[in-house]
Every structure is written in C-alpha cells, then in structure tokens.
Amino acid sequence: MDHLRSLVEVARRGAITDAARALGLTQPALTRRIQLLEAEFGAPLLARSQKGVRLTDLGELVEAEGRRLLERYDHLKREVGAHLRLESGTVRIGGGATAVSFLLPPLIRDFRREHPDVVFHVKEAGSREVVADVASERLELGIVTLPVESTELEVTPLRRDRIVLVGAKGHPLAKKKRVAAKALDGLPLIGFEGDAAIRRLVDRALEEAGVELEVVMELRSVQSILRMVALQLGLAFVSQLGVEAAGQGVQVINVSGLKITRQLAVVHKRARPLSIAAEAFLERVTMG
C-alpha cells in the first residue's frame, strides 16, 4: 500500500522531489519504492525526462487501480477504527422471555448511552434454540438457563433466579401469608409453552411435590402471562424479575415446600472470537 501511495503521489505532483517532500521521504527512498513497485509488476511505470516524470501506459493503469484500492483501504481502516472505539458495530444476542423482557433492557440502555452507534439485534426464544443459534453462529451471545448441553460454548454463570407463584390481587390464595402445595391441586394454571426452560422446571417441581394443576393456557410472553393472571384467569409461575416489573395487578403467593430456582448464564462460542461490540457488552453483562 505504501508503494502504491508513492506512485499516486508522484503522478499527482509530477516530480519525484515534490512527491518525496509530501510523503515525508527522502528522494532516494521514494525512488526505491517506485523501483520495487515496478519489479512487482514487471514493467516500467514511470518515464523520466528533463521536464520531470510521467506515467507510462501501464503506469496509468496501475495508478488508477491503485488509487481505488487506497480509497477502499483507507475506508477499511476508518471502519476498523470506529469499531475499536465502539462508534459502530452490532451485538447479536438472544434469550428467553425473562432475559429479553427484564434482564437485558436496562443493560442495553446503559450500554447505548455510552456507545449510541452500536446496534443490537435481540432474539427472544427458548434456551435450547438460543444455544443452537450461538453454536451455529447465528447469534454471538445468549442468556440461557443452565444446564447447557453443548461442549462448543463458553458458559459464564450470571445469577440465581427464583421462580414464584403469582395470582391476581383478589385471588383467595393471595390473601394468605402462606399456602400448602396441596392447596394448588386442580387450580387453573397459565403456563409458558412446553419447550420453555421455566416450564420444564415448574413441571418437574410440581411432579415431585405431588401437585397437579390444570393448564388452561400456554403463552411465551411474560407480560402476556402476567396480564392474564391480573384478569383472574389463573395462577402462573414466573421469574421474580417479572413480578418486580409487573405493577399492581398481581402478587406473589408463598407456597410451603415448593422452592423453584434456576441458574441463568451467558454463553458464546469458544472457537469464534467475538466482535469488539459483543466483547464489550459481554463484559458489561458479567459485571452485572
């Protein structure tokens, strides 16, 4: 690139001496660069005369193409610099309903306050789908529920998340300080879709406690589930994070002998370096 830049500058100035001064080189150093470039292409690129220098026919071809290459190279350097300074870039991240609705928004807000030109592509999906997308490089980062059944991914634990039972403010069980697990038998339940990590945890915990609720509705969105609960259409098991953001319509029902927790983690592919923006956001996420 330096040799091409030298030829372009000589063509612009029409003299070796003037071009050398503009490039901050000695005349012999610039002459040597031109000679190396001519050796590379195997043809003379400059014709010298008493009036100075001019491009040969092949020199005009090399200079024209070289100028375009230099413009693209300089553009590339600016783009890389912008990424390094986090003045641009993209973060492709996925997570479950809780992560996308409650965990990620404040983190993304704070990150973009510092780096407003970084773009986020956020996908909401179950942990299994997010893990598959990170492994196949459709996503760079994922917020998932452990365990993760993949040896391709780097797994960093984030936080414990408590899963709680919620009911509408006017629900009879919501008026009690604590209820026995058996009191839930046969009651209507609004649940996450069957492939959701929370749903699997809840189903297993209820089975171990010998409790059977009647699933009357399955939804993916936490907000939709909480809305249905607030309308007294049933009870639901959701993340404590969701309850904290739900407002006044629902409340936690404390159940004796039923403790459901999960471990959230962030994952990325081991053998694939993260983009500058994703690396910076990963650091923000793990700092919590």
Image: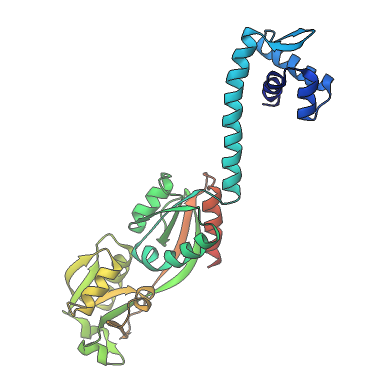
Quadrant of res 56: top right
Task: Name the residue located 55 percent from the left edge and 51 percent from the top edge.
Answer: 87
Task: Name the residue located 70 percent from the left edge and 26 percent from the top edge.
Answer: 2
Location of residue 128 in the rendering, given as x and y in whole percent from the top left corner: 35, 55
The residue most toward the front is 51
Q: 233 or 187: which is nearer to us?
A: 233
Answer with left or right where residue 287 lies relative to residue 161: right
Q: 72 or 142: which is nearer to us?
A: 72
Location of residue 30 in the rendering, given as x and y in whole percent from the top left corner: 78, 21
Q: Is residue 103 visible?
A: yes
The residue most toward the bottom is 176
Answer with left or right where residue 75 lies relative to residue 201: right
Q: 98 or 231: which is nearer to us?
A: 231
Please tell me whether residue 3 is drawn above or below residue 249 in the rendered image: above
Quarter of the image with the N terminus in it: top right
Please tell me whether residue 25 is drawn above or below residue 196 in the rendered image: above
Quadrant of res 137: top left
Q: 228 or 203: which is nearer to us?
A: 228
Please tell me whether residue 198 is drawn above or below residue 121 in the rendered image: below
Q: Is residue 147 visible?
A: no
Answer with left or right where residue 79 lies relative to residue 125: right
Location of residue 63 in the rendering, given as x and y in whole percent from the top left corner: 63, 18
The way the protein has been coloured in the rendering is rainbow
Task: Name the residue located 60 percent from the left edge and 40 percent from the top edge.
Answer: 78
Location of residue 135 in the rendering, given as x and y in whole percent from the top left corner: 42, 47
Please tell me whether residue 116 is drawn above or below residue 72 in the rendered image: below
Tally of numbered discs: 0
